[in-house]
Image (tube, grey):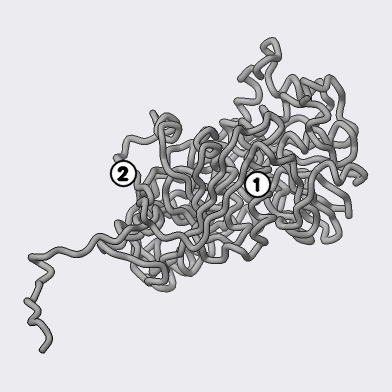
Amino acid sequence: MAPQQSERKPSTSGSVKKAMTMTEKIFSRASEKTQLSPGDNVWVNVDILMTHDGCGPGTIGIFRREFGENAKVWDREKIVVIPDHYIFTTDERAHRNMDILRDFCTEQNIKYFYDIKDLGNFKANPDYKGVCHVALAQEGHCRPGEVLLGTDSHTCTAGAFGQFATGIGNTDAGFVLGAGKLLLKVPPTLRFVLDGEMPNYLLAKDLILQIIGEMSVSGATYKAMEFVGSTIESLTMEERMTLCNMAVEAGGKNGIVPADATTFKYLEGKTSLPFEPVYSDDQARFVQEYRFDVSKLEPLVAKPYSPDNRALARECKDVKIDRVYIGSCTGGKTEDFMAAAKLFLASGKKVKVPTFLVPATQKVWMDLYSLPVPGSGGKTCSQIFEEAGCDTPTGPSCGACMGGLKDNYARLNEPQVCVSTTNRNFPGRMGHKEGKIYLASPYTAAASALTGFVTDPRDFLQ
């Protein structure tokens, strides 16, 4: 006879605590559920919804169709609208998109609408920021432990702050506008442990190109990519943003870095809202763990036509190039330009191909003209770029990263070869469908500008 079991009611016995990853804990908190496992579908409360001029009008149209012409958004202070994609253009349809955003934000009294009205002089627009993913961080909309959704695939950039951040489509965003929540599936987590001292010729772009090269562009499909290790801990916030930015290029649902003193220092003075970081439990289950000794890595590029087409920069030294592009949410932050300026300074040479500079945000643009480059005797990035023969830094926007309109600055309108600090190199990505894009770090991009060939930055940094 089996021993008799006494009935244990949940109210008196409690539930057995299950070890969870960071991403699972964020989902658990946002769905108000104590236990979650990968594959669970849950309604997640959203902390921030971001949209821009590329997807905002479509999102607004869906919101009005489904919730009604006179419906109000769920929370006017949790919606961030950032024009950035098709700004400096004569295209009337692009201007119409801006008008739609402006009218909607006025009607709904949206608190965070970073508008631009004077396209002839971006500096005359104090509210205008620039590239959404960098602006979100600079303006204090990224906080550990929160859920941030955006109508852009590189929304995963914000995972650098220890939060769940991912891109969604217009339909989902239209629903979030009205409801403030979304049905999401809990992703399983891959863990990437990066240890070792970072060589002075590597940047975070090299690290993520290494990882994507290992994983392929589909290796992390609908998985969280958690980045830990002594190397990650040594990275600045902007470098962590570069790392998480390209998680989606491996198919990842999100990239995420545990919040630490570096995170909290960055957030000082940027946000007054309380936040609560979460961390993976020691016994949390990861689908797989990848380990890298960063001290042994070399500068990399991703050859056309895929971010996983990894190669050593030195192996491509015979590839002749036509231009260099430094900009975007991936490679247009202040530290990216500082890195390029450092290499130009070390070389003392002039560029041999047109070199286009597109600051991500208005703050980055100002940094290029005000912050001294270490070891330069007080020179700013802009002075160093001018001495090297680069193009003058242009107005902050997504620029030519996604191709866009024919008159977008630095767009590939001819079948040229470009070394770029951007994130994608598919056919037609920066414009012409026969253009060839080599994705690289700011160091490698600057080195290549000086030679007219894909160049290992160690040629100038050592």
Q: Which comes before the other along the chain, label 1 or label 2?
A: 2
Residue 439 in the image: state x and y as whole percent. 74, 48
Badge 2 density bin: few <14, some 14–19, many ≥20, Cα 10 Å: few
Q: Quadrant of residue 372?
A: top right
Residue 224 in the image: state x and y as whole percent. 49, 58
Q: Which mark is residue 260?
A: none
- The three-letter code of the residue at mark 2 reads Glu
User: For the residue labelled by badge 1, is the local secondary structure a helix, a strand or a loop?
Assistant: loop
Residue 404 makes an appearance in the image: no
Judge from the rendering whether residue 228 lies leftward or rightward of residue 281; answer left or right.
Answer: right
Residue 397 in the image: state x and y as whole percent. 64, 43
Q: Residue at x 65, y 22 (%)?
A: 369
Residues under numbered marks 1 and 2 in contact, where contact means CB atoms less than 8 Å apart:
no
Q: State how far apart marks 1 and 2 are (Cα).
A: 32 Å
How many marks are shown on the rendered structure? 2
Judge from the rendering whether residue 42 lies leftward or rightward of residue 448; answer left or right.
Answer: left
User: For the residue labelled by badge 2, is the local secondary structure a helix, a strand or a loop?
Assistant: loop
The residue most toward the top is 377
User: What quarter of the picture does the N terminus occupy?
Assistant: bottom left
Identify whether 418 is placed above or below 172.
above
Q: Which residue is mark 2?
A: 276
Q: Residue at x 85, y 36 (%)?
A: 354
Residue 371 makes an appearance in the image: yes
Judge from the rendering whether residue 305 lies leftward or rightward of residue 365; answer left or right.
Answer: right
